[in-house]
Image: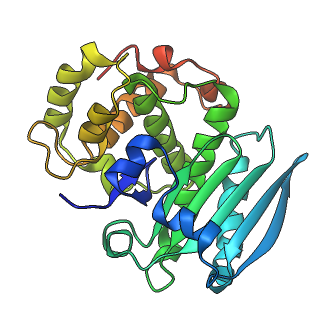
């Protein structure tokens, strides 16, 4: 099994770290690696501040990062200050499979980004920022438990993927990782398990590269298809209204 997996949509961590929701290796280095040098940039959106703490070799990414925030904020209102920590990575999975940029939203106030500066990060940074921004706004609007139910995870990831598509126009590989037929079979297996708070099941459904029952990234594609179908049916273009809806309402029709 690959030691590295995706958390949130886009963050690299070991399975143990994901399951305990501890800091990822890159995040830990932000605290303990004295060889890394960081600077700070600021952006104000409405009445709130975005504080960007970035590794200095990522300075040229900051205008793109801010563009992603401004693009996302045109569709979603921010309700508190946010801190973004951006660090560099040489991880091959991020470089080869994720377009050179990965992200993780810890809560309503904190986002983490890791960027491979030698990759095609410019192509994906705005969409990734929009995706993670959507997670943060969801956390601001809806109180979620420390450990999510499968229902919560599907809605979180489905909303963020649809928002990235609506705001930026990008559809990432995890949104189309399985066919509609495979998604229907996956939904049939999970429909009666939506209230479960099993980290092992979450890992198998969303992340495991070699699970015998669920294809890699199956949960992300399923989430995207369910939420895209629901949003089309609701015919609501206002993302601020969408983000206030309960997980139960957003997923009630299933696939």
64 on left or right of 202: right
The residue that appears at 76% across and 41% down in the rendered structure is 78
Above/below status of 93 relative to 197: below
The residue that appears at 79% across and 72% down in the rendered structure is 40
Q: Quadrant of residue 60?
A: bottom right
Above/below status of 205 relative to 18: above
| Residue 129 pos. (x, y %) | 59, 58
Task: Please tell me which residue lies in front, 196 or 237.
Answer: 196
| Residue 91 pos. (x, y %) | 38, 75
108 on left or right of 124: right
Task: Please tell me which residue lies in front, 217 or 228.
Answer: 217
152 on left or right of 211: right
| Residue 250 pos. (x, y %) | 47, 20
Q: Quadrant of residue 87?
A: bottom right
The residue that appears at 18% across and 28% down in the rendered structure is 184
| Residue 224 pos. (x, y %) | 37, 38
How many numbered circles does the render carry? 0
Task: Please tell me which residue lies in front, 56 or 45.
Answer: 56
Work out which residue is located at the far right of the displayed protein and give it.
Answer: 47
Specify how the rendered protein is coloured. rainbow
Q: Quadrant of residue 220?
A: top left
- On the question of residue 147 being in view, the answer is yes
- On the question of residue 125 being in view, the answer is no
The residue that appears at 19% across and 52% down in the rendered structure is 209
């Amino acid at each position: 099994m690959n030691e590295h997996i995706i958390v949130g949509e886009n963050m690299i961590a070991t399975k143990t770290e994901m399951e305990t929701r501890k800091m990822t290796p890159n995040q830990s280095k932000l605290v303990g690696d004295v060889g890394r040098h960081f600077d700070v940039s600021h952006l104000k959106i409405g009445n709130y501040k975005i504080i960007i703490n970035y590794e200095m070799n990522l300075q040229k990414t900051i205008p793109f990062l801010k563009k992603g925030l401004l693009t996302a904020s045109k569709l979603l209102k921010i309700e508190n200050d946010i801190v973004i920590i951006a660090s560099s990575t040489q991880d091959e999975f991020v470089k080869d499979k994720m377009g050179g940029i990965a992200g993780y939203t810890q809560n309503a106030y904190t986002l983490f980004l890791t960027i491979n500066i030698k990759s095609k990060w410019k192509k994906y940074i705005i969409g990734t920022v929009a995706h993670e921004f959507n997670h943060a706004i969801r956390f601001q609007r809806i109180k979620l438990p420390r450990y999510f139910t499968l229902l919560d995870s599907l809605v979180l990831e489905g909303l963020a993927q649809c928002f990235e598509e609506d705001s930026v126009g990008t559809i990432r590989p995890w949104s189309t990782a399985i066919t509609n037929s495979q998604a229907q079979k996956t939904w049939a297996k999970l429909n009666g398990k939506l209230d479960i708070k099993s980290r092992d099941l979450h890992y198998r459904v969303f992340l495991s590269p070699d699970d015998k029952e669920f294809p890699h990234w199956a949960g992300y594609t399923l989430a995207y298809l369910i939420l895209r179908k629901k949003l089309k049916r609701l015919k609501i273009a206002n993302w601020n209204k969408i983000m206030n809806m309960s997980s139960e309402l957003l997923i009630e029709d299933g696939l």
